Each structure stands twice: as structure tokens, then as C-alpha cells.
Image: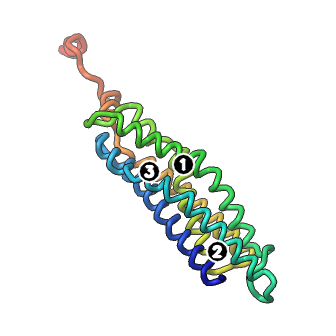
Amino acid sequence: MFDLALFGHVLGATLLISAVVISVSGLLRAHRATTSEQIRAVTSGVPVADRLIPPAMILVLGFGLYLVAARDNRPGTVHWNSGWVIASLAIFALMSVLGPAVEARRAKRLHLAACAEPDGPIGTELDRLRRDPLHAHVTLFGASQLVALLYLMTNRPGLTATLIAVVASTLASVVTARLTLGTIPATPLDTSLNHPMRTPATTERAMP
């Protein structure tokens, strides 16, 4: 049973990683897009990620709890009061709330807005949705914490190293989110605001 549980745990982690890669890559590519059809294409994986995440999290959590319980009574192995186990459960609980409540909703809203918009330059509302800072920060925070979870599960560090890993991954997600938000190209509307059209009246006033 232990080997089967380990397989289920790894399988769930693999599915979860796949879903996170789809979500993160779609958002980052949407930030670099210049047309609505490009955003529509890069966010087309949102429904796939939505279907992968629930069973993946059930597999990871269910079999993970079993693995800890199976080893808890063995000396020198995993225990419920281990720092990395407590941190892993806390991260998992936090992402179980932020994922559906923030990231999934905003990703779906972005994809639906792109599907509803005609081909061509990115409209004001679609541009606002892809620039949503909360969407970027939560998506990249989830990805960074998944990396932290992989480190915790494979290395089983002490409390100090666990806290360092969690804090470092969180800071990395914040920096990455700010950098990617700053690289979003200006829309035609943004350009027109920076360079207003010259009307005949302004042209006449500009003439000597």
C-alpha cells in the first residue's frame, strides 16, 4: 500500500505541475501579446488547467497524508510535528483558497473576454484584465510555492531551512510579477494618449 500511495502522490504532483505550467505560461504570454487573438490562443489552456487541478490536489493531499501517517511511528522518519510537514500543509491550505477564489476566476475571465473580443488590437477591458496585478501575483505565488513544496518534500529540511525556502520563493514570485507586469506593451489607446492627434485647429495655432 505504501508504494501505491507514493505513486499516487507523485502522480498528483505531476498533474499539478502541468496545470501550473499551463496557467503561468498562458498569463506570461498574454502579457506579451499585441492582439486579442493572441491572448485568446495563449489562454486556451485555462479550461484544461481547471480540470487538472482538483484531482491533482486530492491525490497530493490524500496520499501525502497517508505517507506521513504511515511513517509517523517509525523512528528517524517523517512526523506530523516536522517543520516541513507543517509548512507544506499550510501552503497547501492557502493555495486551496487562493487558487479557486482568485487565480482560476481571473484566468477564466481573461480567457472569456478574449473569446468575446473580435480579432485585432487589444481593447481597453481586455488590456485591463491582463494587467490585473492580483492575478499575476497570485498565479506566480502559487508557482513559487509549488517549487518550495517540491524542495520540502524531497529534502525534508529543518524549520529554519523551511522558512528560508518559503520566504525566498515568495520574494521571487513578487519580483517576477512586478517585472512581467512592467513588460506589457502599450495598447493603441495608450499610445494615442501619449501622442494626441493634431486637429486642424491645433495645427493652425502651431503655424507661425
Which of the marked residues, 2 or 3, is nearer the chain's N terminus? Answer: 3
Residue type highlighted by circle 3: Pro
- Kindly identify which residue carries mark 3: 47
Circle 3 — which element? helix
Asked where in the image residue 60 lies, by quadrant, the reply is bottom right
Kind of residue indicated by mark 1: Glu
Is 82 drawn above or below residue 141 in the view shown?
below
Q: Amino acid at mark 2?
A: Leu
- For label 2, the crowd category at 10 Å Cα-Cα, with few meaning under 14, some 14 to 19 and many 20 or more, is many
Name the N-terminal-most of marks 2 and 1: 1
Q: Is residue 66 left or right of residue 55?
A: right
Q: Quadrant of the C terminus?
A: top left
- Image quadrant holding the N terminus, namely bottom right
Question: Where residue 93 sits: x, y (%)?
Answer: 68, 58
SS at circle 1 = helix
Q: Position of residue 50 (x, y in %)?
A: 49, 53
Of residues 165 and 4, the one nearer the viewer is 4
Q: What is the residue that sits farthest to the bottom in this orientation?
A: 75
- State if disc 1 and disc 3 touch (CB < 8 Å): no
User: Taking 6 as reference, is 104 above or below it?
Assistant: above
